[in-house]
Image: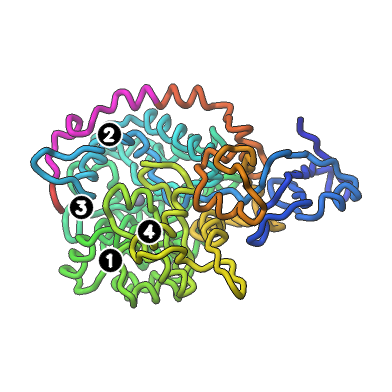
Amino acid sequence: VTHTARVGSGARGAAVTVLAPDLIFHQGRVESGLALAVRDGRIERIASAASLVEAGHTLERLPGRLLLPGFVNAHSHAFQRVIRGRTQWRPARGQADFWSWREAMYGAALGLAAAEIQAVARFCFLEMLLAGYTTVGEFHYLHRDEHGQRYADPLELSRRVIAAAEEVGIRIAHLHVCYARGGVDRELLPEQRRFATPDLDEYLRDVDALIAAYRSSPGVTIGVAPHSVRAVPPDWLRPLHDAASSWGVAFHMHAAEQPAEVEAARAAWGRRPVELLADLGVLQGGTCLVHATHLTDEEVRFVAEAGVVVCACPTTERDLGDGFLRGQELLAHGGTVAVGSDSQTIIDPLEEIRLIEYHERLRRLQRVVLGGNETADTVEPAPTLLRIASAGGAAALKLHAGELQAGMHADLVGIDLEHPSLAGWTEAALPALLALSAPSAVVADVWVGGHRRVTAGRHPLLAEAALGFSEVARRTPLLSALTGIPPRRQ
Ligand SMILES: [Zn+2]
């Protein structure tokens, strides 16, 4: 039962909901006795439950729950959910790597009809909500039909993916991808024909049209996303960045995910991808580089000090054999880090953040590497990791979210304190239990813009969305048969 209180005429009767969980994760600590007032989709204030009752509000009690800011998935390709479990093989006489995986992924991208892309995205976004992601940054590069023709409505697939997000109620930052080349100084490949945006002005008009179309949609923002230095000519990057700045929208780009990309850039321009981007002037505060795995010491320092957000996708980077994020160095230089589920191999924000710490341990043969809450005697990285999952992603997507603070979107997750993986919890141990041990199945309740989307682990569209997705997935064979393309190096 939802109890809402109404305030006086000064607020024109707008309903205030006051959520009163057992515990709130607030300013890096777990605290009890606090409640959170929500109005018009935003957090109005956080105060003691007792003072809010005194002010005349009725509390919506959330027994057995710890409330956190919703997790932000800053980098996703929703359609790739359909190839989960279908690329975990290699040729008996050969090897599998990022590039062979990419061939398989292209095969899936070519085979999906528009309605199927929507069905896959809808289920993928629902799975994200169940895991506690309240926002997805959808790096969307499926623009054209199976034959490479623009749809009658050139924004057909963007609209369908955004509609999928709206259906299940996840906030979406639709990062419209610019994709013009098949590789450094190479024509687009036939299997990349659905991605093509061959004309810069046409691409910018498309983004402008999207911004206008969704200006009044509260859960939708649009961003500019040149795919990578492989896929976009260098002389387009500054105009793209300037357009994003003038619109005030997010600017995202893959960079330095693979050594082969670094080498191709050096061969073509005599500079590494991040050096090239820095020279072009696009590595300014708020730019988001996705992966940024293969950085030199200088590049790490430059990126961190410029205020560039690095979106790590550790479960995908692990799956593809990309390499390790230089997380400790980025954070030590004051950098901002976000996470994304990227290829959807795993959709679990807690797994993403803990790999940032655990990968450092494996690299260094040490325990407890990252900084965080510090006392004279101890350093605890869990609060840092939890901030990466929420505030880091919000910074990447330019959203007023990711913190329990007045004025922020009321995007929230309620953790089930009775989940077996948390048994024995104390307030002091909870951040570490979440960040370093628990699965995302501990997420019981999810609110987006103050609206409850998930209740006790259930979403109302789960059965329907799963059925629609399964029908598409069953038509997707193991990708060796689908592509008929032998793995090939770029
Ligand atoms: Zn990606």
Q: For mark 1, does the 10 Å Cα neighbourhood hold few (<14), some (14 to 19), or many (20 or more) residues? A: some
Task: Name the residue tied to disc 3.
Answer: 182
Judging depth in this view, the residue of 186 and 356 nearest the camera is 356
Residue drawn at point x = 66 percent, y = 59 percent: 29
Cα distance in 3D space between marks 3 and 4: 32 Å
- What numbered label is drawn on residue 359? 4
Q: Nearer the viewer, residue 290 or 161?
A: 290
Q: Tag on residue 234?
A: 1
Question: Of the residues under marks 3 and 1, which one precedes in the sequence?
Answer: 3
What amino acid is at disc 1? Pro
Q: Position of residue 450 (x, y in %)?
A: 68, 43
Mark 2: secondary structure? loop
Amino acid type of disc 4? Answer: His
Instruction: Judge left or right: residue 46 versus residue 289.
Output: right
Measure the C-alpha gap from mark 3 to mark 1: 14 Å
Q: Pointer 2: what residue?
A: 86
